[in-house]
Amino acid sequence: MTETAPAHAQAVVIGGGILGTSVAYHLTKRGWRDVVLVEQADLTAGTTWHAAGLMMQVQSSRTVTLWGQYNDKLIPEVEALTGMGAGYRRTGSILMASTEARWEEIRRSISMAHAADVEVHAIGAAEAKRAWPLMDTTGIVGAAWYPNDAVATATDLTQAVAAAARLGGARILRHTGVTGVDSANGRVTRVRTTRGDIATDTVVNCTGMWAREVGRRSGVSVPLHAAEHFYLVTEPIEGLTPDLPVLRCPDERTYVREDTGKLLIGFLEVAAKPWATMGIPEGTEFLRLPEDWDHLAPEIELAARRLPLINDVGIMLFFNGPESFTPDDRAILGPAPELSGYWVAAGFNSHGLRSGAGAGRALADWIVDGDPQEDLWEMDIRRFAPFQSNRRYLHERTTESVGLLYAPHWPFRQVETARGVRRTPFYDRLAARGACFGELMGWERANWFAPPGVEARYEYSHGRQNWFPFSAEEHRAVREGVAIFDESTFGKILVSGADACAVLNRICTADVNVAVGRMVYTQWLNDRGGTVADVTVTRLDETSFLVATGGPVLYHDLDWVRRHIPGDARALAVDASNAYAVLGVMGPRSRELLASLTDGDLSNAAFPFATSREIDLGYAFVRASRMTYVGELGWELWIPADVALHVYDTIVAAGDAFGLRHAGFHAMDTLRIEKAYRSWGHDIGETDTSLEAGLGFTHAFDKPGGFIGREAALRQREAGLRRRLVVFALDDPEPLLTHNEPIWRDGVLCGWITSAAYGHTVGRSIGMGYVAHPGDGVVTPEWVTSGRYELEIANVRVPARASLRAFYDPANERFRG
C-alpha cells in the first residue's frame, strides 16, 4: 500500500542523504516531532552512497573541525539508539608533505588542531613508513599523525541516522518526488509531493547536487555544480589490515584508505570535469558515470610515485560518481534570503559525510532557535551574489574548485577561473597603474599595486610574498601622506520611509535618530546579544538612511533588515550598491588635497569626524563622509556612478602635488589591524557579543524603544565577561600571523587568533583573538594584561604582548585632527 503524505508538518526535509537525515534527526532531538523527510528514490541514492568514508577531524576552519569531532559523539549515540552499526572505526590518518611549503602549511594546521583540542603529532618519514609500510617515503619532508581520525560506511551511517530520526518521531517518505514549494507573502506555506501536499512553514533543501535546480523552482539561488569524482579500488592485497591509517598525500593529489582488504585510492585532480551543466538527467539514483582513463592517467602516474604497488596490483573497480562543489569550496547552509522559511544544507564539496552530523545539528539549532549557535558565516548561503548561480560561471569555476581542495592553501590565494564578472568604474584606470586584482563575490578588487617594471601578479609563499614591500609603501603613504582606495565594492543599503528611523533604531545598538548629515557606527545584535552586523549608518534626510557594510555581507545584512521591518511599517530596504562608486582619500594630507578641489569647508570645525554632506568636486557633486577604516584623517567619497570616472581623474590629476599614492585592500587590512578595527566574519560574528568584542561603547541602552539584544547585553554586562577580544603584537618582528593561531597564557591554551596582519608602522605582526579564563571565571582587564602570552605559529610558540587597546594611536587622535 502506498503511503500518503501527511497533511501538515513542522518541517519538511527534502533529500535522504547524510545531510537530510542528520537535519531530521537533530530536529527531533530539539523536540520537533512533526518532521517529514522526503526522498525521490532510496536513502543515500544521490551522492552519499559512493562517499569514500573519510572521517577526518581537522578541516579548513575551526567550525568544520568541531563538526568532525562531533562524529565521535553522534555515531555511538545513534548506534546505541538503533542497534545499527555505522561501520565507524578509528584508524588514524597521516597527512604528508613532499615540499617545504606544504610542510609549513601542515605545521600551521597542526597549530589549528591544538586550538580545537584535536590530538595531533608531527612525525618524520621513518615514523610514517612504520605506520604505512606500503608507501615510498622518498622526498617526504614531514607528516602529521592524527590518531583519532576514522573511516565509516556511508550507507550504514546514513541508515542509522535515519532510523534514529524515525525513533524521534520523524516520518520518511521514500520514492516521493517534490514537485514544488508554495509560498504566500514571501513565506513558505506548502510542499507539493507526488504523494500529496504537506502544509508547512519550514522546508530544508538537502538535495545535494540537485539543490540548485530544486531551489530555482522556488526562486532561491543555490550556487553549486556537479563534477565527476574518481577513485579506484584495487584487487585484494595480502596482509592489508583494517587498522591501516588513512593516507593523505596532497602534493600527489591522492588519498588512500583500506577497504575490506583492498585499497581505495581517490583523486582530486587539478582540472576537474564539470557534469550536467544543463541539468541533472532523470533517473540518476545510484549513478555511476563512464570511466575516463585518459583524464585520470596523469593523476594515477603521480600517485604511483608514492604508491609503487599501483603498478603491480590489479584494479577491481574504476569508480566515477558526481559530487557537488561550490564557487569557494565551502558548504552552503542557512536561510534563503529570497524566501522566509526556506533553508538549505548542500554543497559540501566531497566532505559531506564527515560534516553531516555537525552540519545537521547546527542547522537544526538555527531553525529552532532562530539564530545560529555556532560561527557559521563561512558557509552562510547569504555570502553569495545572485549571479553566482549562473550555469556558465559555475561550470568554469568547478573546473578549478575540485583541485583547490588539495592544492597548496597559500595565504591570499586567488582563484583563476570565472574572473572579471564584476568591475568597478575605476577598474581600467587602476589596472593601468599596476593594480593586482583579487576576487571577492565576483568583484575584481585592487589588492596591491605593482611599481613600474614589476608584473602585477602573486608569487605565493607562507612568508613575505612578492607584494609585501609594495603594500608596505602604500601603508606608509596613508600614515604619512595621502592615498586613494577604491572602496566601491562595499555594500550599500538604503533604508527609507516614514518609519525608517524607528525601524533602524530598533535594529541598531546605537541611537541613529541623529541630525541629518551625521554618521553613526553601530552593531546589530540578535536576541542572545550576538553580533549580526557591524555597520555605519548615515542619515541622509528625515526619512532616508544609508547603511554601509562589507561587500561580502551585503545580502546577509540586507536580509536581516528586511526580516525586521514590521508588516505594518512604512519602510523599505533596497540594495543601493550599484548606485554609488566610492573612493577613500585617506591620510594626514587628505584635507589639503580635497580642499584644493572643492569650495566646501573641510576644516575640523566645519566638517568634524562622522559628518557626511554633499560637496562639489570638479564638475560633480559627491557625498563626502568623514569616516575611516584605516585610522587616519580622511573622507569616503560616495559618487554617483555616472560621474565616477570624472571625479577619480580630477583627484588623481591634482594628487601629484600632494604625493598621492594608490593603495589596495592588503594595505587597508594592515592599517586596520594596527588600529584594532574589527572585521565582521572574522573578529566578530553572531556567536560573539559586542561587549566581548570591546564595542559596548556603541550601545545606547537608554534610548526609547531599546534595541534587539539589549536585555542580553545588560545581563552580560551585569554578570561580567567570560571572554574578551584582545590585541596581540609579536615580540619577534619576523614571524607572520595569519589566523587560527592558538593563544597560550602562562602555558595554558586560552583562545585563538581571529584575524591578523603585519603592522608596518609598529614593525611586527599583530593579531586579534578572544581569550577565555581557563576556570570559566570573569576575564577582567587586569587578568588579561597580567599574563605571559605566546602565539603558536606553525607548531612553534612565539612570545607576544597583549593589550585591550590598539598598538597604533590608542587615543584615537590621528583621525580626529
Image (cartoon, grey):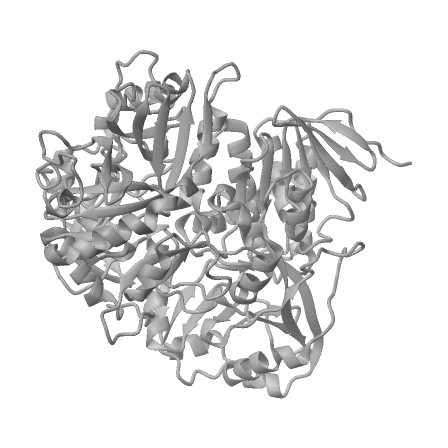
Q: Position of residue 411 (x, y in %)?
A: 34, 62
Query: Dividing the picture into quarters, in which one does residue 392 lie?
Result: bottom right
Q: Residue at x 47, y 45 (%)?
A: 383
Instruction: Please give left or right for residue 751 compared with residue 440 in the image.
Output: left
Residue 83's place in the image compared with 89, above or below, is: above
Residue 402's place in the image compared with 485, above or below, is: below
Residue 68's place in the image compared with 522, above or below, is: below
Query: Dividing the picture into quarters, in which one does residue 690 lie?
Result: top left
Q: Position of residue 391 (x, y in %)?
A: 62, 56
Residue 750 appearing in the image: no
* Quadrant (top left, top right, bottom left, bottom right) of the N terminus: top right
Q: Residue at x 30, y 74 (%)?
A: 455
* Direction top: furthest residue: 704
Number of numbered discs present? 0
Residue 213 appearing in the image: yes
Q: Position of residue 163 (x, y in %)?
A: 70, 41
